[in-house]
Image (tube, grey):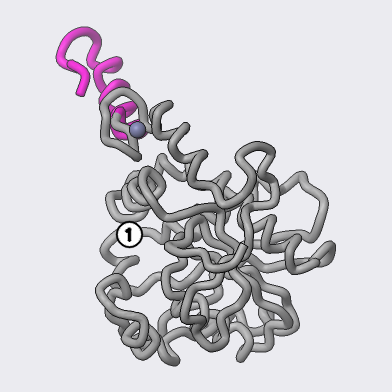
């Protein structure tokens, strides 16, 4: 923290504000100095599933094992390991929303890989964030995955291909436990019929192609349940894109 006590009160206030807006601590390793350090930037590049250079394909399809029934094809940018794990957690759980700039390019690559992999070359494709639980939204005061999707689509705005629109169309229809403490079978039971398309989005989803987006795919239970809700609402095709995957069983 800088010393704001000397000099003009206006400058001091601006300095304090800058500290709020731009935390001077790395989102990957917590080292002081910058919000995303050069060391973490280099380490992140090694986690990509795709080629080390010129990776515009967004990495390969990943398949969790066992595959949950109804899991759509999932594209992931890279492996869920530090510093990516740390930066996702700092962004989502610790409120470091400034790190959206680190994560958006990864999601951008994954979404565009999923769209290309599905062979969707034109028309409109909806980008549907996985639903956050009501509790999580209340605790955080916002839905970071929606903002991340919007930041990613901005980066894709000038590219060829289908028009992509963020559609926060899904919600939980009953309470679910935090998935992270549960095993594979428990996760599936916890989420069974837990997600639905919001009534206002029903018409928009019907006959549409959708890319489901989540930060991390672990067992695939969340994406399978969200895909079920979209298909039930009449979605014509569903694929998924995530920043990271905890495992990869197919290249
Ligand atoms: Zn770092």
| Residue lying at 15% horizontally and 15% vertically, measured from the top left | 5
| Residue 108 x/y as whole percent | 61, 50
| Residue lying at 80% horizontally and 67% vertically, measured from the top left | 119
Residue at the far top in the pictured view: 7
Quadrant observed for ligand 1 in the rendered image:
top left
Residue at the far left in the pictured view: 5
Q: Nearer the viewer, residue 177 or 250?
A: 250
Q: Secondary structure at mark 1?
A: loop
Q: Is residue 38 left or right of residue 9?
A: right
Residue 3 is one of the magenta-drawn residues: yes
Residue density around tag 1, few if under 14, some if 14–19, many if 20 or more, within 10 Å? few
| Residue 150 x/y as whole percent | 57, 53
Residues in magenta? 1-24
Q: Is residue 101 visible?
A: no
| Residue 231 x/y as whole percent | 63, 86
- Relative height, residue 51 to residue 63 (above, below): above
- Name the residue tied to disc 1: 141
Q: Is residue 36 visible?
A: yes
Q: Nearer the viewer, residue 192 or 204?
A: 192
Q: Quadrant of residue 216?
A: bottom left
| Residue lying at 41% horizontally and 61% vertically, measured from the top left | 143
Q: Is residue 23 left or right of residue 74?
A: left
**Quarter of the figure that contains the N terminus:** top left
- Relative height, residue 229 to residue 90 (above, below): below
**Quarter of the figure that contains the C terminus:** bottom right
Q: Nearer the viewer, residue 16 or 109?
A: 109
């Amino acid at each position: 923290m800088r010393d704001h006590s000397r000099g003009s009160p206006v400058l001091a206030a601006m300095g304090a504000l800058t500290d709020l807006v731009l935390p001077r601590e790395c989102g990957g390793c917590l080292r002081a100095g910058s919000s995303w350090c050069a060391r973490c930037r280099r380490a992140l590049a090694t986690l990509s599933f795709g080629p080390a250079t010129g990776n515009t394909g967004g990495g390969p399809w990943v398949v969790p094992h066992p595959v949950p029934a109804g899991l759509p094809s999932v594209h992931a940018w890279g492996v869920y390991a530090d510093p990516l794990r740390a930066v996702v957690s700092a962004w989502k759980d610790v409120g470091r929303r400034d790190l959206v700039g680190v994560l958006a390019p990864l999601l951008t690559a994954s979404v565009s890989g999923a769209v290309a992999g599905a062979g969707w070359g034109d028309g409109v494709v909806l980008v549907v964030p996985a639903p956050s639980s009501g509790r999580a939204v209340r605790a955080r005061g916002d839905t970071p995955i929606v903002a991340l999707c919007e930041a990613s689509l901005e980066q894709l705005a000038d590219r060829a291909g289908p028009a992509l629109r963020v559609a926060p169309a899904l919600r939980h229809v009953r309470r679910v436990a935090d998935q992270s403490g549960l095993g594979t079978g428990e996760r599936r039971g916890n989420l069974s019929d837990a997600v639905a398309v919001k009534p206002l989005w029903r018409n928009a989803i019907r006959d549409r192609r959708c890319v489901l987006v989540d930060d991390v795919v672990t067992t695939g239970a969340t994406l399978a349940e969200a895909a079920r809700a979209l298909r039930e609402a009449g979605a014509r095709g569903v694929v998924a894109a995530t920043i990271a995957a905890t495992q990869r069983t197919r290249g």
